[in-house]
Amino acid sequence: MAKHSDTSWKQDHPSTLFSNSVQKAERLLKHAKSHPEEIAIEHAFDQIKHAENARYNAEQYGEHLDTVQQNNEYLEQIKQQLHNMKEQVKKQ
């Protein structure tokens, strides 16, 4: 059984939340690649916004900044791929 505390694990470990958010963005990118529809791409962009908020919180927390930086670089790659996909979908 999980322990309950006064603070959420999200507050205790914002770098973990950011890592998880980036992983979810990656999964949504893969889904959008296999189903290149506008709604799938928009869901991935929504997750990127969530991940960017998590990144900000992780940077404010100030721990595991090397991991935060790596995840941020990967998130930027995901974002670029989604922008490219969005442009391709618009052309069709």
Image: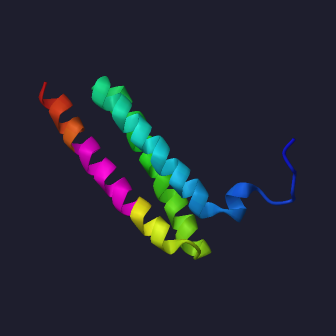
Residue 50: % across, % down:
50, 50
* Residue 2 appears left or right of 87: right
Q: Quadrant of the C terminus?
A: top left
Tell me which residue sits at (25%, 50%) in the image: 80
Tell me which residue sits at (35%, 56%) in the image: 74
* Residue 41 appears left or right of 83: right
Residue 3 in sight: yes
| Residue extending farthest bottom | 62
* Residue 19 appears left or right of 4: left
Magenta stretch containing residue 6, yes or no? no
Residue 37 in sight: no
Residue 9: % across, % down:
73, 56
* Residue 2 appears left or right of 33: right
Identify whether 17 is placed above or below 57.
Answer: above
Residue 61: % across, % down:
61, 73
Identify whether 59 is placed above or below 82.
Answer: below
Magenta-drawn stretch, dominant element (helix, strand or loop): helix
Identify whether 22 is placed above or below 59.
Answer: above
Instruction: Say which of 74 and 42 sits in front.
Output: 74
Q: Quadrant of the N terminus?
A: top right
Highlighted magenta segment, given as a residue range: 72-83
Tell me which residue sits at (59%, 57%) in the image: 16
Magenta stretch containing residue 77, yes or no? yes
Q: Quadrant of residue 57?
A: bottom right
